[in-house]
Image (cartoon, rainbow, N blue to C red):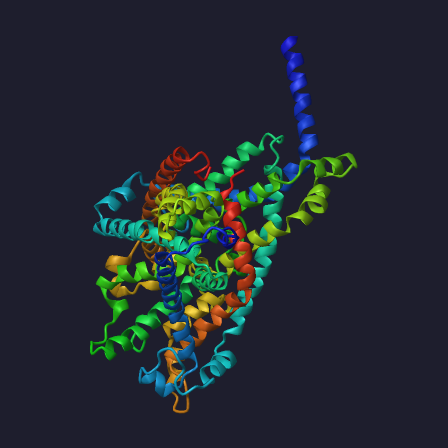
């Protein structure tokens, strides 16, 4: 966002009131940002604290009796890596499939000279405004064999009208001359799409890919409905079961030499789930902002 | 003779059309099949709301029951409770949370220190990308025994409060968690709208001796009102689709009475308890009312601004 620039010369004379105003606003925003960060910092502190500190409710913003024991236990024996891998692979695979499907669908829809595109757009937009009720949706997908099936983490999320419209809007703005020149050279429509249009569409692909990726990574409702086999749990389901504290976890925390509690282990799980988001955050921030803009431009 | 010739020409142009655009049809085919399979067939499955669904006979084979499920629905006291909860939580999300991103964006825009601005924006946006499962975990830990909330209460000499198990606290928690997770991201759209405001407006206001607050109040704010209004209208259209994940990860059996919304109710009754036909009637009611609202408010949004609606 390039908001800072124009201000530079707009405030030659800064009155006292203006300086006060700026200070008050900065103060409020800093307080808001700190308040946003507190639950995260506190969770990190709990995850790094000892059993007694946790049992005595002594942990606020800093670790008390710092220890990595909770982390060591959960990462080594918590059974968190398999769900993590399931989430990673299904997200990567899902984004790849989603991008191919969306690009193929959006390209013809971006062509005004292709008359049926108008009707197919209606067909697409209707899915955005009328959602199938959950129960027939569940029953239908179950008849497809998606119950307790890895693919239920992917297939329901590979095309949304909203994202499709973003890609289509982008294709609409692609300079026609380039495509026409390629056509005169005898390129077919598939080759134009893949060799001329797509290489110039990296930004929109990154944006939409991230939209799909975040949805798939964070999804909870579909696995909750469709997966009851623990071997197929994606990360979010695993996190929820750790936070809920199953009997297995309770037994473990009861052990004499265990330097962790239900609270510290669940804190580890929560922080563990946030780390990948933080790692991807620079890209997420960059491309999501672009997407928010693209989404507001209709084609 | 004339008509025959015309038809022949039409047929010719149709084959020409297909020959020319065959690749386009081929490209769209997977997407169309996908939408039919995953969106339209489940929609058709809604007919079981008018049937007495039996697992063995399936969606299409089950016997018709007319409006029986809907009758049951409107006689059911639970229905009005869920409707009320959905409306109350929708109101919180749509109207109470709504102004906060706008205010945050106006304030962020006033920050002169670019680094500080970037840092604050980064921090307040992070929660948007965290799943509701994880946010639920954070909320439970924050408000639970040994969480900061109760530690502070204890330091002030107050009793421990089991916030997440208290009916009276569910709505405040819902409000706070929504603000925490979503308001930071909401500022992005407003900041983009602010960046497209003509700088000369501010310059001439400065020459006229306007203070910073006056510029914010009389230039930036009025120019954001159309954007805000459109976002509000689109949000009202989506009033009934609050999102399953948030409520499901924040409620407890003790707070069902105030927290249960259509989405969570349908999940528990329809999918966990397998009352398929009845839950479909509930879901269909929600979808149809939702459809009407989206269409109406989209129309209004289009009236307010030429390019305002979703379509």
**Residue ID at (65%, 19%):** B10
Q: Residue A261 occupies which quadrant of the picture?
A: bottom left
Q: Is residue A132 visible?
A: no
Q: Position of residue A164 (x, y in %)?
A: 54, 45
- Which residue is at the front of the view, A107 or A28? A28
| Number of marks in the rendered image | 0
- Where does residue B247 sit, x and y in percent of width and height? 34, 59
The vertical placement of A16 against A251, above or below, is: above
Nearest to the observer: residue A74 or residue B205:
B205
Quadrant of residue A190 within the rendered picture: top right
Relative to B101, is B256 on the left or the right? left
Relative image position of residue A171 (x, y in whole percent): 61, 41
**Farthest residue in the top direction?**
B1
The quadrant of the picture occupied by the C terminus of chain A is: top right
Please state which of residues B68 and B229 is positioned toward the viewer in this rendering: B229
Left or right of B92 on screen, residue A78: right
Q: Position of residue B59 (x, y in %)?
A: 42, 45
Outermost right residue? A185
């Amino acid at each position: 966002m390039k908001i800072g620039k124009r201000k530079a010369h707009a405030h030659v004379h800064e009155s006292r009131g203006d300086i006060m105003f700026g200070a008050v606003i900065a103060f409020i925003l800093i307080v808001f940002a700190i308040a946003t960060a507190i639950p995260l910092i506190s969770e990190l502190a709990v995850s790094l604290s000892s059993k007694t500190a946790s049992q005595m409710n002594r942990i606020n913003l800093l670790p008390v009796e710092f220890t990595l024991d909770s982390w060591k236990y959960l990462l080594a024996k918590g059974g968190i890596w398999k769900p993590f891998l399931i989430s990673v692979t299904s997200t990567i695979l899902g984004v790849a499939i989603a991008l191919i499907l969306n690009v193929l669908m959006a390209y013809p829809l971006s062509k005004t000279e292709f008359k049926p595109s108008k009707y197919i757009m209606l067909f697409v937009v209707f899915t955005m405004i009328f959602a199938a009720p959950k129960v027939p949706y569940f029953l239908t997908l179950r008849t497809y064999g998606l119950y307790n099936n890895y693919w239920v983490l992917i297939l329901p999320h590979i095309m949304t009208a909203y994202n499709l419209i973003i890609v289509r809007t982008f294709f609409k703005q692609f300079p026609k001359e380039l495509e026409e020149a390629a056509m005169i050279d005898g390129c077919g429509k598939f080759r134009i799409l893949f060799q001329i249009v797509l290489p110039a569409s990296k930004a929109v692909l990154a944006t939409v890919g991230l939209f799909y990726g975040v949805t798939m990574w964070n999804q909870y409702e579909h696995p909750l409905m469709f997966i009851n086999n623990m071997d197929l749990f994606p990360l979010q389901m695993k996190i929820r079961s750790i936070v809920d504290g199953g009997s297995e976890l309770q037994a473990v925390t009861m052990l004499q030499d265990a330097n962790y509690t239900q609270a510290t282990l669940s804190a580890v799980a929560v922080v563990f789930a946030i780390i990948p988001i933080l790692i991807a955050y620079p890209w997420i921030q960059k491309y999501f902002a672009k997407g928010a803009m693209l989404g507001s431009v209709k084609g | 003779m004339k008509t025959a010739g015309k038809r022949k020409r039409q047929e010719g142009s149709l084959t020409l059309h297909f020959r020319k655009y065959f690749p386009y049809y081929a490209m769209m085919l997977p997407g169309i099949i996908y939408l039919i399979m995953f969106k339209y067939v489940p929609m058709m499955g809604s007919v079981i709301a008018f049937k007495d669904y039996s697992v063995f006979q399936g969606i299409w084979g089950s016997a018709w029951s007319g409006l029986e499920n809907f009758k049951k629905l409107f006689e059911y006291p639970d229905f009005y409770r869920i409707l009320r909860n959905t409306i109350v939580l929708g109101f919180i999300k749509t109207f109470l949370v709504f102004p906060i991103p706008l205010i945050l964006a106006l304030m962020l825009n006033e920050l002169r220190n670019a680094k500080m601005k970037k840092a604050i924006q980064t921090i307040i946006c992070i929660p948007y990308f965290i799943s509701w499962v994880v946010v639920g975990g954070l909320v439970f830990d924050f408000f639970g025994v040994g969480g900061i909330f109760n530690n502070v209460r204890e330091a002030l000499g107050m009793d421990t409060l089991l916030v997440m198990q208290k009916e009276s606290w569910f709505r405040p928690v819902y409000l706070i968690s929504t603000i925490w997770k979503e308001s930071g991201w909401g500022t992005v759209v407003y900041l983009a709208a602010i960046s497209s405001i003509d700088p000369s407006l501010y310059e001439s206001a400065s020459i006229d001796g306007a203070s910073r607050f006056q510029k914010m109040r009389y230039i930036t704010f009025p120019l954001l009102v159309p954007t805000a209004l459109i976002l509000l209208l689109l949000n009202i259209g989506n009033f009934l689709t609050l999102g399953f994940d948030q409520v499901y990860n924040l409620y407890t059996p003790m707070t069902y009475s105030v927290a249960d919304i259509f989405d969570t109710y349908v999940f528990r009754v329809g999918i966990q308890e397998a009352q398929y036909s009845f839950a479909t009637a509930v879901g269909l009611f929600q979808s149809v009312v939702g459809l009407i609202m989206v269409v109406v408010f989209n129309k209004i949004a289009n009236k307010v601004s030429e390019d305002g609606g979703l379509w």
